[in-house]
Structure formats: structure tokens, C-alpha cells
Amino acid sequence: MSRLPLHALLGFAAAARSGNLTRAAGSMHLTVSALSHQIRTLEERLDRQLFDRSPRGVRLTGEGERLLAKVAPHLDALELALRPYGPRRDDVLTLSVTPSMASAWLVPRLGDFLAAHPQLEINLQSSTAVVNFEHAHGVDAALRIGRGNWPGVESEHLFDEWVAPIASPALIARMGGMPGPDDLHRWPLLGDPDPHNLWELWFARHGGQPPQRYVAYFDDSEALHRGAAAGVGVALGKLTRVRLLIESGQLVVLTDARLQTDYAHYLVYPPRSADHAGLQALRTWLHGQARDYAAGEPGAKRRRRAGAS
């Protein structure tokens, strides 16, 4: 038997998965009669009836189910392999970003960017998972927090991250008011998910003794911040990401002191996105926004005062 035409197998798989020739033909940009002809030709070549046909649609026969089970994984693998070579639209940009970074930093600024670039469509994928660009071919870039050493991607520093003790108004009231400079270790503290133990760094930098124990530990920053807002204890809050909770009054910063972490915010993208026109526009805008934001960080203010003295 000569080789089966690939387009006939694709038509068979589309009809099998949809159960409707009209929908399957539309997904392949074919007429219903053209798709029906492909399927009949395939059945004749295989000498097997693959579908039972009825006014309500088509349904796989036993032979059709066995064929689909054998060919579907290979067709899916071909589609995945060819996806990076599909046409790219430079007026559509898909950006992966964590929910807290999206709501607290990016989205409040995004309207100005879109107003300046009305031809560009931004698709935000909000997730705490780190995007794998090798598999997520539809994602063009991401905003990440870390040390900037991710393999296989371009990584551009935007701004640093600072932390400070934060607590709910209810906890402050329960403790009798704001803590003094040497009182913080007596408060219920929440263990930080950072492996470098930011509390030990905090007390080493700003004085005081770490507690003998923490009242609770959280394995991610989002849960840590929410725990502090619920009054569980005092957290070292990532100030960029808790801005909305502070502005809404759910959290209060307990001191003017700050601690700069050894991780920062970055724009990252795979090499395939480097010449994406939409990303180039967003990249320029992001760096400008990051410079303005960094200029207002506590560390920047201290550096300016030191330079003026």
C-alpha cells in the first residue's frame, strides 16, 4: 500500500475529536464535502469503516477508535514540533506574570502603554508557576523575581526588591500599639520562605535578636502576605507585591527601616522573541517605568542623601 496522505489522517482526527463534520471542516478551513471525501478515501484505502454516520453527526466505529489511538499521539507530536514555526504576529504579545506583580505593579501602569500603542494587543497570563519557554511557545516574555541567572533566556534587570516588617491593624492593636526599635523580636513573627532566612539578616542589620521560634511558616510569599493580613503574625513583606494590601489598610509597615534582598525583578524572554516588535516596545516602556519606580525606593533615597553630603 502506498503511503497514506497526511491531510486525510488530519481530517479523520479532526472529525473523530469533534464528532461533527461541519465543525471539523471549519477548523481545517475545508468544505464539508471536501472533508467527507477525504474520510471516504481513507476508509477505502484501509478497507475499514471508521465512522458511523447519522443525522446527529458522526461516531467512531471500533476500527476508528483503534486507528485514532494509534495516530493521535503522533499527530499531536507533529503539531507541537511545528508550533514554533507558525506565523508570528508582532501586534500580539503574550506576557507571563505572577498575580501579585500584575495587580500591584504592572496593571496600574499598563493603560498608559496601551494608549501609546493602540495597535498592540497584550495577553497577560497570570500564574505563580515559572513559564517554560521551550514548551510554552505561545508566551513571548515574562516578568520574574530572582537572581537573573535563568538558563536559556535573556534576562534584563528592572528594579530591586526591598522588605520590611508588616502586620495587620488588628495585630498592632492586640500588641498595644506600634513596636519600639528593640521590641520586634517579642512579637509573633512569621517564618519567611526565603532560604537565606531574611529575619536573621534583618536583625543583624537593624539590631535585636531573632526569636527562639516563629509562630508559623509559609512556603510561598503570597500565603505569607495573606497570613500577615489575617493577623497571624508579622511578616517581612515584599514591598512591591504588598503595595495594594498596604494602601487598602489591610497591612501596616511597622518601621521606616528597609532591607534589600539579593533578588530583583527582571524582564525575561527566549531568543526567539528578541526581534518581536511588540516586545521591543514593551521592553523600552518597562525600563522607563522601572527607573521611575526605583528612584522612589528607600535605598535610592539613602544613596541620594549620601551623595549630597
Image (cartoon, helix red, strand yellow):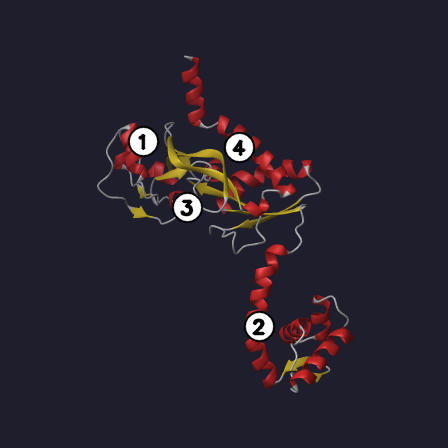
Kindly report which numbered mark, 1 or 2, lies closer to the viewer in this rendering: 2
**Residue furthest top as drawn:** 309
Q: In the rendered image, which quarter contains the N terminus?
A: bottom right
Q: Secondary structure at mark 3?
A: helix
Kindly report which numbered mark, 3 or 4, lies closer to the viewer in this rendering: 4
Are discs 3 and 1 less than 8 Å apart at CB?
no
Using the rendered view, name the quadrant where residue 120 is placed: top right
Kindly report which numbered mark, 1 or 4, lies closer to the viewer in this rendering: 4
Within 10 angstroms of label 2, few (less than 14), some, or many (20 or more) residues?
some
Kindly report which numbered mark, 3 or 2, lies closer to the viewer in this rendering: 2
* Amino acid under disc 3: Arg
CA–CA distance in space, label 1 to label 4:
32 Å
Image mark for residue 226: 3
CA–CA distance in space, label 3 to label 1:
21 Å
N-terminal of the pair, mark 3 or mark 4, is 3
Q: Residue at x 74, y 66 (%)?
A: 29
Per the image, the residue denoted by label 4 is 290
* Amino acid under disc 1: Pro
Per the image, the residue denoted by label 2 is 72
Please name whichever residue, 188 or 136, is drawn nearer the observer in this view of the structure. 136
N-terminal of the pair, mark 3 or mark 2, is 2
Are discs 1 and 2 less than 8 Å apart at CB?
no
CA–CA distance in space, label 3 to label 4:
26 Å
Q: In the rendered image, which quarter contains the C terminus?
A: top left
* Amino acid under disc 2: Ala
Per the image, the residue denoted by label 1 is 179
Please name whichever residue, 181 or 51, is drawn nearer the observer in this view of the structure. 51
